[in-house]
Image (cartoon, rainbow, N blue to C red):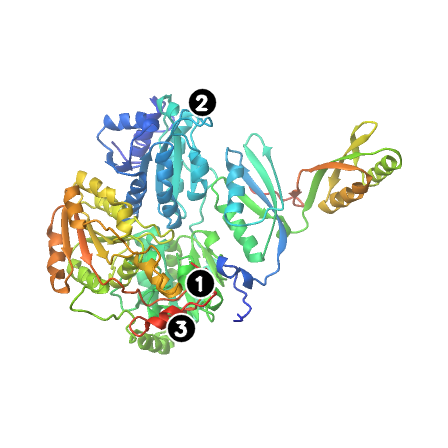
Amino acid sequence: MTKPAIDQPASAYFLEDRKDPIEAHTLSIVVDNEPGVLARVIGLFSGRGYNIESLTVSETEHEAHVSRITIVTRGTPMVLQQIKSQLERLVPVHSVADLTVSGNAIERELALVKVAGTGDHRVEALRLADAFRARVVDATNASFVFELTGKTGKVEQFISLMQPLGLVEVVRTGIAAISRGVDRLRV
Amino acid sequence: MKHENGISGMSGEEELMTGAEIVLKALADQGVTHIFGYPGGAVLPIYDELFQQDQLRHILVRHEQGATHMAEGYARSTGKCGVVLVTSGPGATNAVTGLTDALMDSIPMVCITGQVPTHLIGNDAFQECDTVGITRPCTKHNYLVKNVNDLARILHEAFHVATHGRPGPVVVDVPKDVQFAKGRYIGPANIEHKTYRPQVKGDPVAIEAAVALLLQARRPLIYSGGGVINSGPEASHRLRELVEKSGFPITSTLMGLGAYPASGPNWLGMLGMHGTYEANLAMHGCDVMLCVGARFDDRITGRLDAFSPGSKKIHIDIDPSSINKNVRIDIPIVGDCANVLGDILGLMHERKAWPDPDNHRDWWRDIARWRRRDCLRYRPSDDFIMPQYALERLYALTRGHDTYITTEVGQHQMWAAQFFRFEEPNRWMTSGGLGTMGYGLPSAIGVQVAHPKSLVIDIAGDASVQMTMQEMSTAVQYRLPVKIFILNNQYMGMVRQWQQLLHGNRLSESYSEALPDFVKLAEAFGCHGIRCAKPGDLDQAIREMIEVKSPVLFDCRVANLANCFPMIPSGKAHHEMLLGEDVPDDEIEQAIGAEGKVLV
């Protein structure tokens, strides 16, 4: 049986009918820094079946006990709107901004990349790190730890270049994002 | 004790009290008069305070789930916040079903749970569980109180959060050492959550657009829900005024019954899976839909891609996440139903622009034709009681009374929604979202606590009622004359109906073998038992039930294999509904396609 294409959204029942494009959006969430607030946010994502591609969280205003959570998530426009509404419904959430909708936000992440090697590989790794403006934060005779900041694409590219040069391990912070211009998120 | 905000606990006035005293004082200052609970090790200090006062009445339940449903019935029938007090560990986990039920149906509730002392938290102490962790997804919000000086503020905040915006359950977990510790009390005056500010006033631009759309409508329909009831009597009042002034037909969800009177000329009956033919076809065919405080639940919409395909949709809801969740909305209006309906009426009044009845003449002609199908018709019998007949008689014989109805979950619930006609809001308590069997009996007790002189009837099924049967003992203890009207068909009727529809009539585990003798059971509980199996005896038996001053278990033996129609099979659209009388059994078995079978 064929069903007509729908512009209706995804009920749990008709997921296979979903034709809307999937988009990745960056959400910035201002929350009270109280115990359990992160669990509420990620519990909402897991409980309702939303994706988390990246998550960063830290207290940003100590006096006000306010934290900022940055989440990169994927979904159809309707699901993304639903995610925002559901987040706003959480009692300790002050405000939620979809930085992808408001446009052209600055997005950065930091990576620490450990590379082990000697000889040409070692020289090449150092040369590439210089080209990527990665800093050497630890060095031994046989290894480096590079610190790299940038957009996700740049970090990905750097890591893939390090792969054949003796990549040992990587840690990444996930994306932190902020809007351009004078405006700030409502606290 | 004074209930006015702040009178008995002005902020700034410092007095040291124990945590347990603070709990009682906060409840009193919130105007709480009844709490439903069960004692245990981790709440003993609070129970000790309860013992030493006589303002707050405590209703001792037999299982914590019962306490939560009683609080729901109490809240739903009064519009006030229900309050529950349970102990740590199993006390809290037993309350989870009722908390989830209250979350799904937006019932305001504050549940205070005891917790092991703070220094033992995380130690796998006796009767410890991670209450805030377990209840996080099934509450609107929850708190663990680690400092006695936060206790009063948190309790007042909990009431604020539970009753403002879209109502819901809030858990406050209080460790035992906090109950003993001394701290400052602050009154409820000016306590607001620092960030929680639900939007109650609708956007005037959207309201303007909605009015314009309503005025042009040729096939309009109002679809109202539980939000109208939750908003309070003013919302129902304005909904009635809008229906009267606009001449629009109106249907409602299960949760919204009573907001518009069933005797009203524009009433189409409930819509959805077991809704009426006229309501569902009107939903399918309307050109402008005004949804007021409902959430396009899957029981309502049926197949989404075929749901009301030709309509422009206006949705009024206090919860922005309900809008555009399942169905795309043309004009969303975030706000409280009473406010927004008032603004719509105000604008029409101001402009002297009311919908023109001439525009709806053809539409009402269609509706009259659908009504003539008489979709709730059933084959009466002289030999055995048809469940529909039992409810018709129950309705007829209770009409003169001040009646409140609760239900369990299943066929009897749907029949009750179809055959019992509600004229006022807050008269109908049922578990809609979660579908909790065992809801009705304790809920009826909660309603009776709030309305001691009223006639409170739980329309029950033989299977559901056994889930919380032990609460009969609570009813007897507090002389609460609830009437448990059991439509006993010796099956889990709705399960059996679905097995007939979906699974080749293989009735796997849905037959109620070894049912108790409900009359003897009534005697064992110390209440009154009645059995009736003949249609001719039914009226007299129902009269007896109403007249008896004690709780009653009424074993109404009904036709075993009756099915609940109309029914929109899963995965079908509103115009593909099955009607009762004319469906042969083999067609019933073919009614749901392979795709529908995976749905619930």
Q: Considering only order in the chain, which callout, 1 or 2, is on the residue closer to the N terminus?
A: 2
Alpha-carbon span between mark 1 and mark 3? 33 Å
Question: Residue A116 or B194: which is nearer the viewer?
Answer: A116
| Nearer to us in this view, B174 or B465 | B465
What percent of the width, then of the height, locates residue B526? 14, 42
Q: Residues within 10 Å of mark 3 (few under 14, many from 20)?
A: many
Q: Distance between the residues labelled 2 and 3?
A: 65 Å
Between marks 2 and 1 in the image, the one whose residue lies nearer the viewer: 1
Question: Which amino acid type is marked by label 1?
Answer: Lys
The amino acid type, in three-letter code, at marker 2 is His
From this viewpoint, is residue B485 visible?
A: yes
Judging from the image, what secondary structure is the residue with disc 1 in?
helix
A148 vs B204: above or below: above
What chain does mark 2 sit on?
B
Specify the label residue B219 is tagged with: 3
Same subunit: marks 2 and 3: yes
Q: Of residues B396 and A81, which is closer to you in this image?
A: B396
Query: Which chain hosts label 1?
Result: B
Q: In this view, does B211 lie to the left or right of A118?
A: left
Q: Relative to B379, say whether A140 is above or below.
A: above
Provide the secondary structure element on which disc 3 rests. loop
Give the labeled residue for mark 2.
B119
The C terminus of chain B sits in image quarter? bottom left
- Residue B594 in the figure: left or right of residue B60: right
Q: Look at mark 1 in the image and give the residue it sits on.
A: B597
- Local SS, label 2: helix
Q: Please say if the residues under marks 1 and 3 sit with CB atoms less than 8 Å apart.
A: no
Crowd around label 2: few <14 · some 14–19 · many ≥20 (10 Å): few
The tag earlier along the polypeptide, 1 or 3, is 3
Give how far across and how far down residue A97 sits, in percent: 58, 47
